[in-house]
Amino acid sequence: MIKEIELQYQNIIEHFPNTVTIENEITHIKIELIKGIILEIDYSKYPKKPKVKLINQTGKVYKKLSNDITSLKNWKIDKTKSILKVINEIIFILKDLQSNIVKIKRELLIGFLALCRAHHPKEFLGILKMDKNVFTEFILPPGAITSKHSGVFFPSRLPTNRYYQGTIHSHPSGNLHPSLQDLNSIFKGNRFHFIVGFPYNLYNIKCYDKNGTELQFKVIS
């Protein structure tokens, strides 16, 4: 097992020469992936699952990624158990997080637009689920109230799930800008918000952050 651990370390430093050991332990390392963001990995229990975290220069945790990394979730059934694979996947996710472009699946939008047309002239709402930094599906909020002029849902009735990071709702008037009521209700508590306006097509959609600032978004297959 010692030889396997040494091989893991050699693979890492070949690809990341800036790797630094912690307390001279090759199984506890840190790598600055981008300026100011450091990846710390402890694989001292190898072949058990390593502990990973992203920290900033002050030591504060930047983002917990364990549940977002496929190679970690599949660690028990993945025979290769490569630390380098984990690092490369984290880099991919980190680059995506640094992007200012929000990504959303085309089939999600197509389905939601169809429901908007079916409920017109009432507003229609959905909660967006994110997977690997892409919005992939939506759920209908329990107890949502809609009318011709507004829509309200109750976040407290939603199941606790960190993957719910956005909302999407329609404006039957065709106005794509958030109302004051949107900002004070639907927009609170989530990172991203889509508004789709009549006549409900892919060209009549805008995305905003929780403060109502418009964001770029990309529709992907």
Image (tube, grey):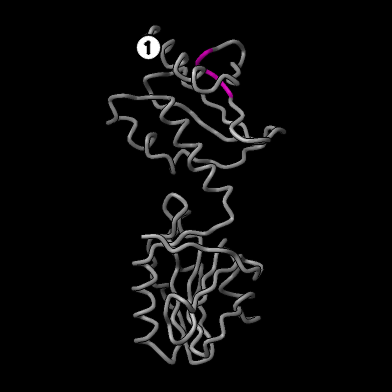
Which residue is outermost to the front? Answer: 203
Quadrant where the N terminus sits is: top left
Q: Amino acid at mark 1?
A: Glu
Q: Is residue 160 above or below residue 98?
A: below
- Residue 112 in percent (x, y) is at 38, 75
The kind of secondary structure element at disc 1 is helix
Instruction: Count the labels in the image.
Output: 1
Q: Position of residue 78 (x, y in %)?
A: 29, 29
Residue occupying the point 55% across, 57% down: 101
Residue 61 painted magenta = no
Pointer 1 residue: 4
Q: Is residue 145 above or below residue 70?
A: below
28 magenta-colored: yes
In the rendered structure, which segment of residues is drawn in magenta? 26-30
- From the viewer's side, name the closer residue of 27 and 88: 88
Q: Quadrant of the C terminus?
A: bottom left
Q: Residue 124 vs residue 53: left or right?
A: left
Residue at image position (41%, 12%) is 7
* Left-right relation of 15 to 210: left
Residue 114 occupies quadrant: bottom left
Identify which residue is drawn at 40% across, 82% down.
Answer: 116
Q: Position of residue 194 (x, y in %)?
A: 51, 71
Left or right, residue 110 beside residue 28: left
Check the image and report above or below for 24 versus 38.
above
